[in-house]
Amino acid sequence: MKKLLLMGLVLISLGACAQTGGYKVGDVVKDFALKNVDNKTVSMADYKDAKGFIVVFTCNTCPVAQAYQNRVAELNNSFAAKGYPVIAINPNDAEAVPAESFEKMQAEAKGKNFTYPYLLDPDHVVTKQFGASRTPHVFIVNKTDKGNTVEYIGAIDNDPEGVNATKEDYVKNAINNLSNGKKPVVTSTKAVGCSIKWKKG
Amino acid sequence: MRIFLLICLSLISYSLSAQVKLLTLDELDKRIAAGKDTTYVVNFWATWCAPCVAELPNFEKLRVANLKKPVKVILISVDFKSKLQKEVIPFVVKNQLKAEVFLLNETDQQKYIERVDPKWTGAIPATLFVKQKIRRFYEQEFTEKQLKNTLLNLK
């Protein structure tokens, strides 16, 4: 009987894990404290003057994330001064993929002159809170009286290959909307990306 | 010498047969509708996706194990169209993929990801099992055993 109960519990908890949880547009984000490549801890609360954040789940190895690296840097260059800095978080487990280690993250950030923090998320805690499923995966949050509220979830643009004649810059447009005191017109998009490399076991 | 020639010939014929055609989702739907009682195992992958490449042999094993059954394994690459000749076809030849391989001929990710399955976030690998009205979608990696069991339990 006890065994049955235990099995039941295990099944329920498995079911809970399998849900595609995470933040939805309109949800208030819990702040985090994650280690940056410079060994200092970064939280959203550290940015007193920020109006919001462009949180980008990205990594060292995914070719799609690599293709977007310059565009992430441009976003930070364009919008940090306007109150919307980029915070990059690596959701991958270094044991699952050694090239995603903290040391490799440091090398990546140094080699590509990252102007924004690149944070380690041990045990995928923040990744799961956000519900990030792939790299790159962007969450735009806006500071409000209620807290940091999610305003956009999805892709940076609809042109990973740089060939789309009808390119739409989802993140740029959303930030421009927010800067003008408006809600983003497009709040959610999908894109092909690399699955997150979860801790094994 | 003769053996050498034979090997060369077989290699050449293999390369020639290793065609990767473009495929739209409309064409995929038509194909599935025409298949009647066939179960289609449709894997979305890319040459740049390490876990996808790692699980491709499991799809080959599934294909071989079901040769005499109405089961069809289709591998749809979501690589960039510009990579078809330089990356995708050489990959198919090098890895001797024997299942049918296509390159997805869709431009708007916002539409096609949702259309394949509303649950799909866009992460790959992802696999769709379709048999007539039954449609099951999984955004995950598959082991050989998981593939076999999912196919068996398709209801």
Image: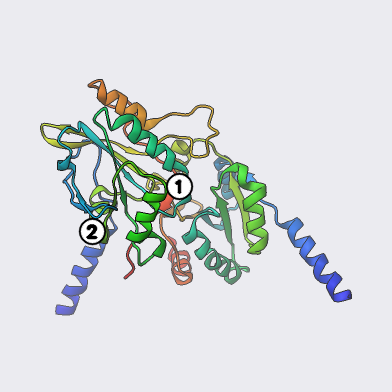
Q: Is residue A40 visible?
A: yes
Disc 2 sits on a residue from what chain?
Answer: A
Spatial CA span between label 2 and label 1: 32 Å
At x 62%, y 42%, the residue is B82
Q: Does dot 2 land on a helix, a strand or a loop?
A: helix
Q: Is residue A102 above or below residue A155?
A: below
* Residue B7 image offset from top left, x and y in percent: 80, 70
Horizontal arrangement in the rendering, residue B70 relative to residue A13 (left or right): right
In this rendering, does residue A196 appear at all? no
Query: Residue A94 placed where, x, y %?
Result: 35, 63
Query: Mark 2 or 1 closer to N-term?
Result: 2
Read off the residue under disc 2: A16
Identify the element where label 1 is drawn: helix
Q: For residue B17, what is the image quadrant?
A: bottom right
Disc 2 + disc 1, Cβ < 8 Å: no
Q: Indicate the amino acid at tag 1.
A: Gln
Image location of residue A90, percent across then percent down: 33, 53
| Residue depicted at x 44% and y 29% | A168
Q: Quadrant of the N terminus of chain B?
A: bottom right
The front one of B34 and B146 is B146
Q: Which mark is residue B81?
A: none
Amino acid residing under circle 2: Ala
The quadrant of the image that shows the C terminus of chain B is: bottom left
Residue B40: which quarter of the image? bottom right
**Left or right position of B13 against B98:** right
Looking at the image, is A28 positioned above or below residue B51?
above
Nearer to us: label 2 or label 1: 1
> Which residue is drawn at the image coordinates 46% and 72% (left, top)?
B145
Q: Is residue B115 left or right of residue B60?
A: left
User: Residue A60, relative to residue A149: is it above or below?
Assistant: below
Residue A66's tag is 1
